[in-house]
Image (cartoon, rainbow, N blue to C red):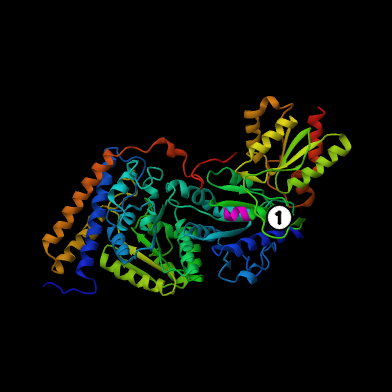
Amino acid sequence: MKRKNDDISTADRLELYRLQVEIRDCEKRAYDLFLQNLVKGTSHLSLGQEGIAAGVAMAMQPGDLSFCTYRGHAHTLARGVSMEKVLGELMQRDNGLMRGKGGSMHLTSVEHGVMGSYAIIGAHLPIACGAAWRAQYLGQKDVSVCFFGDGTTNIGAFHEALNFAVIWKLPVIFVCENNLYMEYTPISDVTAVPNPAGDRAAAYGLERIVIDGNDADVVYRTMQAAFARARAGEGPSLVECLTYRHSGHSRADPAKYRPKGELEEWLKRDPVKIYRARLAEFGIAEADIAEIEQESKRKVEVATAACKAAPIAPVEILTTDVYADGGWAWRN
Amino acid sequence: MAELTYRDAVARGIAQEMERDERVVFLGEDVAKAGGVFKATVGLYEKFGPLRVRDTPISEQAILGAAMGAAMTGLRPIAEIMFADFAAVCFDYIANEFPKLRYMTNGQLGCPLVVRTGNGGGARFGAQHSQSIENWTMMIPGLKVVAPSTPLDVVGLMAAAVRDDNPVIFHEHKSLYAMKGEVPDGEIVDSLGTAKIVRPGKDATVLALAMMVPRAVQAAETLAAEHGIDCEVVDVRSLVPLDTQTILSSVVKTGRLFTVEENPRLCGWGAEIASIVADEVFWDLDGPIVRITTPHIPLPAADHLEDLAIPNAARIVERVLRVMNG
């Protein structure tokens, strides 16, 4: 029996699905491009974690700010940055978000509210606090969202930032993507509590929020409540989203440390698969679903072609934007 | 014109900028209600209120991270790291975050903030509260680094630092906080990247920074009065940007270069200047470049040992004489 629409509209559901499908396809393409040696360096994919990026982004308003980690392609795409800009940066092309100066781990698009992707674990939690402090000080209504992994919960900056955000009642939302592994080591092997973020919330007087990060609806609803609190001046939230990455930690990692069968179990709970079933359950026509999927594939092809055709950046940018005058002069 | 202490000048400089620009906010440990452990920010909380002058927990990463997030979204924060040694617990921001942001984002974001910190020795605080860390900060592309030696320079360079669109590390010298100096009334704005000739001379150039400046001047007076050697003392003031024009033209004029550095010897700021001088005006030199530094040791707490470690006027005189009369 098909369910009737609930608190999430059909339009929102289609958008949540579109975001997840496009992130999935773009991340898969990023992986393919590695294999072709068209993406250099390292890269950290969010395959399997798309439900979080989509659910959070759907709850955000224009002007809200995202602070991402080195695993930030998904969150960048979810704010509306084009695949071409993201893939171009991964491919070191002049059409990339930062023209190749930042790379995969530092995706930034200020015009979309993506205030950077930070590659030193924990660093951006205090930075997000600062952005939220600015909003509070200037009486602006935007909220800062800070994404991080389970491994981040064991570094000092996590704890400093949570305490700071609470005592200053800052409009910031901390989103922990608990994919069960810090890098190669299970998070449970190295953490004092079962839920690395949720079980620490009480230490800062925060509500324990641990949710299914593979269900975009759950993420969306939870985040709507967190945004409402932040905008009402009620302070920060800490949300732990349980998920699983389908690939290794980074390009270099085949993830052989995973117990046999674990991936297969989690693939049954693939957020994209779950959401496709959800759409059907709510009576959304197969044609509408298929259209989103086809359009996503088309976008990936168009973006890939554009990036392959794009030139590399001129060498002059090697020394630009070190200082605010646009240059790099350290002496007269 | 008023006589101010170096510590009063800190508060005066910050107040001047906070009055001018509502985006200027100030945060740190014990800086607001208590007026700072060095009493350098007394009165700011009363004058500008709890929204603009904020006490923080002992969380150096949160202090610098919050300053950065505020700076990149529109404020002009001043953050205090109480003792410069504590920069080591939040060095991620100083080394990885502030100075790389603009470059990595291809100019999309900037980080206009000031980190004030109590730098240097002489207060018998021992190895973890006495270091001169100016060289730690000098080596990072993307930062600006200043270290004033007088109350007047504190006010003017503070204003310049706050108005600069880059992250500026502002090294206040703990042992200079009680120093007095004349400071004119009204707005004072200096410029970063400018050295100052504080004692003109023709026989040798002596470069100094922060607490080493009064000691170099004292040594120069002794050398002139007792040995007929006329030293030009240059207060470097700004390590980044570095005023190489003033430095190089002084060396070309005198033919001699001495650096007086409180940082431990290896990779001290004088080493970089020595290399620039050797590269660019070698044939104008009449003798070896001599660096007078704290030896490569942690600083001891006992006063007689600390006094042996940090360069003083007598040691400057002795080293200059040894080379000039050699």
Q: Nearer the viewer, residue A208 or B254?
A: B254
Residue A293 seen by the camera: yes
- Left or right: A184 as drawn, with respect to B182: left
**Residue at position x 35%, y 55% from top?**
A181
Query: Considering the numbered disc 1 on the image, is that residue within a helix, a strand or a loop?
Result: helix
Magenta region: B159-163
- Outermost top residue: B283
Is residue B162 rendered magenta in the image? yes
Residue A125 image-quadrant placement: bottom left
- Above or below A80: residue A314: above
- Left or right: B39 as drawn, with respect to A56: right
Q: Looking at numbered disc 1 in the image, what kind of residue is underneath it? A: Lys
State the count of labels: 1
Q: Residues within 10 Å of mark 1 (few under 14, many from 20)?
A: many
Is residue B286 rendered magenta in the image? no
- Above or below B8: residue B153: above
Residue B173, percent from left and from top = 70, 53
Q: Quadrant of the N terminus of chain A?
A: bottom left
Residue A266 seen by the camera: no
Q: Residue under circle 1?
A: B174
- Chain of the residue where label 1 is placed in the rendered structure: B
